[in-house]
Image: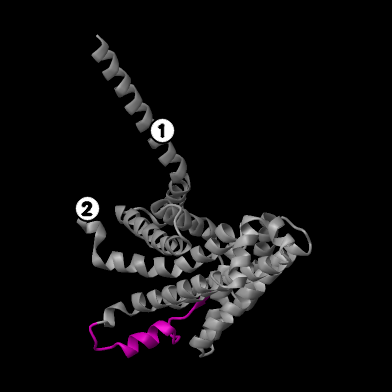
Amino acid sequence: MAAFFTPAILQSALEQGLIYALIALALFLSYSMLNVCDLSTDGCYTLGCATGAVVAIAGYPILAIFAAMGVGVCSGMVNAFLQTKMKVESMLAGIIVNTGLYTINITIMGKSVLSMNDTETLFTRLQDLLEGTPLEGAYQLILAAVFAAVVLVLLLLFLNTRLGLSIRATGDNPDMVKSSSINPAFTTTVGLCIGGAMTALAGCLIGEYQKSCDINMGTGMVTVALASLIIGETIFGKCSIKVRAVGVIAGSCLYRVIVAVALRFDLPATALKLVSAIIVGVAISMPAIKQIIAFRRTKAAAMAKRRKMQGGGK
């Protein structure tokens, strides 16, 4: 079993888990805080990767980060416009945006696959900076951890501001928010724009991390992010906002570790989607599984107590 947890596998899983945690944090904001089901994640993730890849190939890897976040904000704004102004259901609005983004993404890329093998990225810059130091082999993990930590801190600080509290209140009770002279359409728009920016940022980082961008790379990303979110909340339970947000990152890393270990069983590459689907299914079912286990334990304890009482009576 130790062979499945080699340092290289663990490091790679943590690197990807920290980057994908940005998407899980975006869903944490929209799904858990704002109570909005955002299904535009798949397309927005690819949008960030496509935009970041094009800008990085042009020779601006740092600008690629801000460009990706900018288009992510635009994606969230369109999604919010459909929901708040056009009165489209959140699920349908996300599907509409996700469908439209496919054409936009392929237009930005110019072709279905972009290669960045000879492109300078943030990761290659940090690698050159750390060359010859003890941290040389961990440059990808360091950069991913820095981005995850910065986004986590900024998100927690934002959620404690007046606007952040208004967003949380909108998700809890929209009617109360309206009676408090807070515009729920505005708070929904801000929340979805921030979520879109974080999702697109994750796409840009993955593109620079893998040095490639594929038009279909975002397929199923919303399901994976939701699984990471649920894994984190299952582990840490209903705690404070800070603990839950940290749990989201931990859940994303744990999900990637599970996927990495599963792929060590010499499974074909085509089985990756099946492995992911099984992990997602188990993660989403964890609350129900925990309830069933707790119920059976309670039932077994009650039956044992009853048998003990009957034995004592005899």
* Residue 185: x %, y % from top left: 72, 65
Q: Is residue 114 magenta?
A: yes
Judge from the rendering whether residue 256 lies leftward or rightward of residue 226; answer left or right.
left
Q: Is residue 194 magenta?
A: no
Q: Which residue is at 53% across, 84% downward?
A: 64
Residue 196 at least partly seen: no
- Amino acid marked by disc 2: Met
Near mark 1 (Cα within 10 A), the count class, few <14, some 14-19 or many ≥20, is few
Residue 258: image quadrant is bottom left
- Amino acid marked by disc 1: Phe
* Residue 217: x %, y % from top left: 52, 65
Which of these two is toward me, 164 or 61? Answer: 164
Q: Which mark is residue 176?
A: none
Secondary structure at badge 2 equals loop
View extreme (left): residue: 2
Q: Which mark is residue 1?
A: 2
Residue numbers of the magenta segment: 113-134
* 42 vs 121: above or below: above
Could you tell me which quadrant the C terminus lies in? top left
Q: Which residue is at 29% across, 17% downward?
A: 309
Judge from the rendering whether residue 203 lies leftward or rightward of residue 15; answer left or right.
right
Which of these two is toward me, 84 or 244? Answer: 244
Judge from the rendering whether residue 249 lies leftward or rightward of residue 310; answer left or right.
right
* Residue 111: x %, y % from top left: 59, 75
Near mark 2 (Cα within 10 A), the count class, few <14, some 14-19 or many ≥20, is few
* Residue 182: x %, y % from top left: 71, 67
* For discs 2 and 1, the disc positioned in front in the rendered view: 1
Q: Which mark is residue 295?
A: 1
Judge from the rendering whether residue 142 lies leftward or rightward of residue 205; answer left or right.
left
Q: Which residue is at 70% across, 69% downward?
A: 186
Instruction: Say which label, 2 or 1, has the lower sequence index.
Output: 2
